[in-house]
Amino acid sequence: MASILKPGQILKGRLSTYSLVKELYKSTDNGVVNCEEEKCILKSVPKHWRLQNESAILKQYQSKTTHLRPLLDEIQQPSEPSSIVLQYLDTDLLSASNKERLSRPKIKQVAKSILEAPSVFHKDELVHTKGQLIGAAISRSPEAAFQLHWGTATDIWSFGNAILSLIYGGDYHLFNPAIEGYKLEDEEYLYTVLKRMYKFFGPFPKSYDDFKDPDVIRVVNALHLMGPPEKPFHLVTSREISPVDKEFVLKIMKLDPRDRPTAEQLLADDWFTEESEDTRVPL
């Protein structure tokens, strides 16, 4: 958050006036402001186009789905950094899951809510993630990790990744190189993400040749030289994940984006209506 915004500072928006209560420096939520008798979140970035783009998207789509954090206002003074006011949330989903493993019905409720927003975006070929390198490496789709062209299917991979983290709980991320002792700054970090994709959902299909990218093919061939995937996800036992949950995840986590279902197809999946016993063993 730019240093020109300080706690106690008065901010003037299009619709109201706010006082900055505290700075957060957490994720993309930069500060808490007084919003009438409630708290709101202030999001600030130094690049105007990023926030202008987010603001425009929220204005266009928040009336079409209830599963977006509402845009409440846009700050006009000060004009730098560019800032918007969003609805305040007490916590985020993964943090809550890290503290207490969610039940299967709750995970399904969350999954449906997550999917309903991109199902609206994707009709207009709008992808939730943008830019050259999108999101954290451990949640990035294979095509994004390889810096290939990506589209709406990359959101589906990210969705599946999030559901996996909710199913396992306890801050466990399947593709996290830290499990193998790597740190973000290590040279092998990004390659280890790909290795873990291969380990659970490999091998990479022959269709990757269609991308006609020599560097990608070289890395894929190097991964294949490691031998058969060490722990294919389809062999994960019911002590780790319910069989029907595993089947649902396997539909999503396809290494070739062209093989993944759409958000609308997933919303119609029987997984949302089945009721099977939770066989997972607490971590």
Image (tube, rainbow, N blue to C red):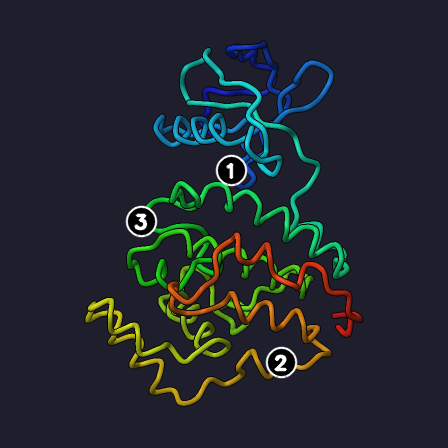
Q: Say which quarter of the image contains residue 161.
A: bottom right
Q: Residue furthest right?
A: 277
Vertical relation: 207 (above or below) 145: below
Q: Quadrant of residue 116?
A: top right
Q: What residue type is labelled 1?
A: Thr
**Residues at discs 3 and 2 in contact (Cβ within 8 Å):** no
Location of mark 3 (residue): 132
Mark sitting earlier along the chain (1/2): 1
- Whether residue 48 sits left or right of residue 30 in the image: it is left
For this rendering, which residue is in front, 187 or 222? 222
Q: Position of residue 66 (x, y in %)?
A: 62, 35
Q: Depth-wise, is mark 1 or mark 3 nearer the camera?
A: 3
Name the N-terminal-most of marks 3 and 2. Answer: 3
Please tell me whether mark 3 sits on a helix, a strand or a loop.
loop
Q: Position of residue 136 (x, y in %)?
A: 46, 54
Where disc 1 sits, the SS reads: loop
How far apart marks 3 and 2 lie (CA) works out to: 33 Å
Q: Residue at x 66, y 59 (%)?
A: 166
Q: Please name the residue shown 50% across and 56% down the image.
A: 158
Q: Is mark 2 on a helix, strand or loop?
A: loop
Specify the label residue 28 is tagged with: 1
Q: Which residue in the structure is indicated by mark 2? A: 236
Q: Nearer the viewer, residue 232 or 65?
A: 65
Tell me the mark number nearer the camera, choosing from 1 and 2: 2
Q: In this view, does 11 lie to the left or right of 143?
A: right
- In this view of the protein, can residue 176 be seen by the observer? no
The three-letter code of the residue at mark 3 reads Gln
State which quadrant residue 244 falls in.
Answer: bottom right
